[in-house]
Image (cartoon, helix red, strand yellow):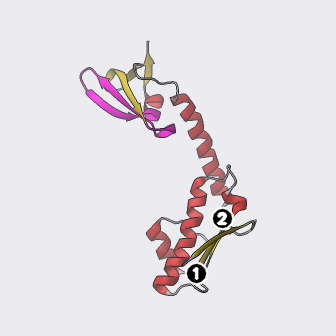
Amino acid sequence: MIAVTSGRAKTILGQFSAEGEGSFRFSTVYFHDPTWPVEEALNVIRHEYAHYMDHELYGGTGHGSTWKKCCAGIGAVPQRCYSSRVAKLLQGKHKEETRLSVQCGGYRPGDRIKHPSFGDGVIEEIRGESVHRLAVLRFGKAGTKTLSLAWVHKNCRKSP
């Protein structure tokens, strides 16, 4: 059975070792940091899993072409090292999503909106969470439409 362990490494985010039955090790320094973007955490997991796949499928042990092929197959970014620039971009994205989520929290069923193409509408229902909420709107001529609430906030106006 493959072991998954953690440690407090500050220079290694994750590691796959092919010794024995194989093992994964991840740094709690990063994985327990609430400011570290979840996309980065998922990429580290995929990165190490690509090493496992590369070892099992091709006998690979590094960051060569077969490892990159495995990365492409599971959606890992085929880069060797962590990028603080990418992490900062993702942190900015999360801040923007948080701001937009708060703004979207101001919408309720019964609110009237003016859509740029469909005209006047009424929010009948709001589903989902955060910036992924959907609004079910009823428009006079266009009928019922389900739209992203974030899109509604950015592109429509609330009507009195």
Report whether 133 appears left or right of 102. Answer: left
Residue 50: horizontal and vertical position, in percent?
A: 52, 73
What segment carries the magenta color?
128-151
What is the spatial separation of the Cα atoms under label 1 and label 2, in whole angstroms?
23 Å
Residue 118: horizontal and vertical position, in percent?
A: 31, 25
Residue type of the residue flagged with mark 2: Tyr
Secondary-structure class at tag 2: loop
- The quarter of the displayed image where residue 26 is located: bottom right
Vertical relation: 128 (above or below) 40: above
Vertical relation: 64 (above or below) 136: below
Residue type of the residue flagged with mark 1: Gly
Secondary-structure class at tag 1: loop
Residue 136 in magenta stretch: yes
Vertical relation: 78 (above or below) 61: above
Q: Residue at x 45, y 36 (%)?
A: 133
136 or 85: nearer the viewer: 136
Give the labeled residue for mark 1.
Answer: 22
Mark 1 or mark 2, earlier in chain: 1
Vertical relation: 85 (above or below) 61: above
Residue 37: horizontal and vertical position, in percent?
A: 62, 52
Give the labeled residue for mark 2.
Answer: 82
Mark 2 closeness class: few <14, some 14–19, many ≥20 residues within 10 Å = some
Q: Quadrant of the N terminus?
A: bottom right
Report whether 48 appears left or right of 138. Answer: right
- Looking at the image, do the residues carrying marks 1 and 2 touch, with CB atoms under 8 Å apart? no
Q: Residue at x 74, y 68 (%)?
A: 11
